[in-house]
Amino acid sequence: MATQKALSLTVPDVPTLLSAYMPFLDRGGMFIPTRGLYELGQTVYLLLTLPGESERLSLSGEVIWVSPDGVTGRRMPGIGIHFNAQDYMVRDRIETLLAGQLDKAAPSFTL
């Protein structure tokens, strides 16, 4: 298995967060735009800054989605990570920011 990698992501606004967040995962997850090479199952360490916040949240997760460089359509290259069990606090903060919007049919970076 590949070594653990570190990424940093600053989400500029709530609509972008809504498009990147994966609420269908039990622990939550996030799409991270990147052109780097990642493998399914790889562990990723993420420093995440949410919209309107200056605090960088640290979390880790497993790569469960890969959109490689050169992907077609409206998709962009990147990975989807499933948050680890100890990162429920991050999922809860994201879902608080997205309260009342998670069931809207907004375009997503993954589906």
Image (tube, grey):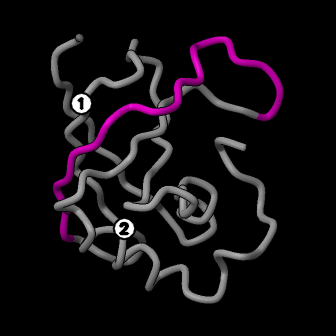
59 is within the stretch colored magenta: yes
Q: Which class describes the residues within 10 Å of circle 1: few (<14), some (14-19), or many (20+)?
A: many
Q: Is residue 19 left or right of residue 50?
A: right
Q: Residue 104, position in %: x, y? A: 77, 74
Mark 2 or 1: in front is 1
Q: Main secondary structure of the magenta part?
A: strand
Where is residue 84? Give x, y as percent: 25, 51
Q: Is residue 66 above or below residue 12?
A: above
Q: Mark 1 falls on what kind of element?
A: strand
Q: Position of residue 22 (x, y in %)?
A: 54, 56
The amino acid type found where label 2 is placed reads Leu
Q: Is residue 21 magenta?
A: no
Q: Which residue is mark 1?
A: 43
Position above or below: 105 against 99: above
Other-residue count near label 2 (Cα within 10 Å), few / some / many at <14 / 14–19 / ≥20: many
Query: Which residue appears at 55% of the width and 87% of the height?
Result: 99
> What is the span of residues highlighted in magenta in the rendered image?
55-74
Does residue 73 appear left or right of residue 19 in this picture? right
- Please name whichever residue, 20 or 41, is drawn nearer the observer in this view of the structure: 41
Left or right of 31 in this view: 74: right
Residue at (67% x, 11% y) in the render: 70
Q: Which residue is denoted by mark 2 in the rendering?
A: 50
Task: Identify which residue is drawn at 54% across, 63% down.
Answer: 23
Q: Considering only vertical position in the picture, is 82 above or below 65?
A: below
Element assignment for label 2 = loop
Instruction: Residue type at mark 1: give it.
Output: Thr
- Quarter of the image holding residue 92? bottom left
Q: Please identify the quadrant where the N terminus is shown.
A: top left
Residue in the foreground of this view, choosing between 83 and 71:
83
At which x and y percent is residue 64? 46, 33
Mark 2 and mark 1 residues within 8 Å of each other at the beta carbon: no
- Residue under the point 22% across and 50% down: 47
